[in-house]
Amino acid sequence: MVSAFTVKGRFLMGSSFQKFEKVVRASQEENAREKVFLDLGSKHGVKRKNIIIEAIQAD
């Protein structure tokens, strides 16, 4: 079953951290985490080590 997850956290953009909040559809929390890593990495060129996920909540 696919659910919506709200993922909140920060990522390093230049020399400062930017906050983000994304809603992704995934079957599990771990898949939602992976989608956020992929999305931020492809759109902003951010490496995984520079992405800090603070909270994941199922909607």
Image (cartoon, rainbow, N blue to C red):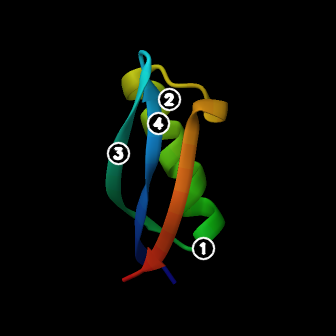
Query: Gap between marks 3 and 2, in whole Å?
Result: 15 Å
Q: Residue furthest top?
A: 14
Q: Looking at the image, is mark 1 or mark 4 earlier in the sequence?
A: 4
Three-letter residue code for mark 1: Gln
Query: Gap between marks 4 and 3, in whole Å?
Result: 7 Å
The residue to which callout 4 is attached is 11
Three-letter residue code for mark 3: Lys
User: Residue 59, how many percent across, how many down?
Assistant: 36, 83
In this view, the residue in front, 32 or 48, is 48
Identified at 58% across, 31% down, the residue is 50
Query: Gap between marks 1 and 4, in whole Å?
Result: 22 Å
Q: Looking at the image, is mark 3 or mark 1 earlier in the sequence?
A: 3
Three-letter residue code for mark 2: Gly
Dividing the picture into quarters, in which one does residue 15 lie?
top left
Q: Around disc 1, counting alpha carbons within 10 Å, would you say few (fewer than 14), some (14 to 19), or many (20 or more)?
A: some
Identified at 60% across, 51% down, the residue is 34
Mark 1 and mark 4 in contact? Answer it, CB < 8 Å.
no
Residue 19, label in figure:
3
Q: Looking at the image, is mark 4 or mark 3 earlier in the sequence?
A: 4
The residue to which callout 2 is attached is 41
Q: Looking at the image, is mark 2 or mark 4 earlier in the sequence?
A: 4
Q: Nearer the viewer, mark 3 or mark 2?
A: 3
Q: Nearer the viewer, mark 1 or mark 2?
A: 2
Mark 3 and mark 1 in contact? Answer it, CB < 8 Å.
no
Residue 28, label in figure:
1
Q: Looking at the image, is mark 3 or mark 2 earlier in the sequence?
A: 3
